[in-house]
Amino acid sequence: MLLFGTESLTSRPLSKSLKIKIYRIIILSVVLYRCETWSLILREERKLRYFENNVLRRIFGLRRDEVTGDWRRFHNKKLNDLYCLPNIVRVIKSRRMRWAGHVARMAEKRGVYRVLVKTRRERHHWGYLGVDGWIVIGWISRMWDVGMWTGLEWPRIKKVGGRF
């Protein structure tokens, strides 16, 4: 009987290639749902890498040390060599880049396009946003991190004379 849980990843009758397919198709699709809009900080990237390494250790199991004969876990570098596919953080970044391409090709009337790709000459339609409005726009640009990897220019909060 095929189980879809931690038992399926440690099951001996299942081949490693089938376990990797289970991980990529079932587990990653659930974990990475809507990851295109995530803004990852380094701590979250580490947690995702830790999760992925845990799953890969379950898939590849233990190895026997040639010198001492003891059973040992695989190190992260060896796991990455055995997995041969992009790690979870790279998958997230590539999906974000693909999503940015979709946004760039959207119609100008769409809300996502208006927030992310507004050009300088169209910004006067926003009117005066005030300090709170620019803080919200700045927060969106930092949280979505879109400006950094698409080359889009974002409105910045200017501090003049100690005031916004």
Image: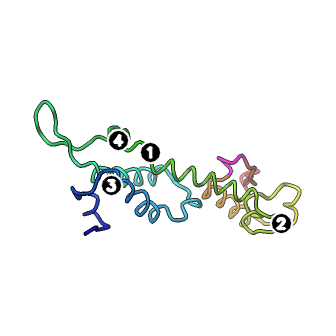
- For badge 2, the amino acid type reads Tyr
Marks 3, 2: nearer the viewer: 3
Q: Pick whichever of labels 4 and 2 is earlier in the sequence.
A: 4
Q: Pick whichever of labels 4 and 3 is earlier in the sequence.
A: 3
According to the image, label 3 marks what residue?
55
Q: Pick whichever of labels 3 and 1 is earlier in the sequence.
A: 3
Which corner quadrant of the image does residue 74 belong to? top left
Query: What is the C-alpha distance between the residues marked 4 and 2?
Result: 55 Å
Q: Pick whichever of labels 2 and 1 is earlier in the sequence.
A: 1
Query: What is the C-alpha distance between the residues marked 1 and 4?
Result: 9 Å
Question: In the rendered structure, which segment of residues is drawn in magenta?
Answer: 147-151
- For badge 1, the amino acid type reads Leu
- For badge 4, the amino acid type reads Leu
Query: What is the C-alpha distance between the residues marked 3 and 1?
Result: 14 Å
Query: What is the C-alpha distance between the residues marked 3 and 2?
Result: 50 Å
**Considering the numbered disc 3 on the image, is that residue within a helix, a strand or a loop?**
helix
According to the image, label 4 marks what residue?
82
Marks 4, 2: nearer the viewer: 4
According to the image, label 2 marks what residue?
128
**Considering the numbered disc 4 on the image, is that residue within a helix, a strand or a loop?**
helix
**Considering the numbered disc 1 on the image, is that residue within a helix, a strand or a loop?**
loop
Residue 10, given in percent of the width and then of the height, sits at: 24, 57
Which quadrant, please, contains the C terminus?
bottom right
Q: Pick whichever of labels 3 and 2 is earlier in the sequence.
A: 3
From the viewer's perspective, tell me whether residue 68 is left or right of residue 109: left
Disc 4: CA contacts within 10 A as few (<14), some (14-19) or many (>=20) = few
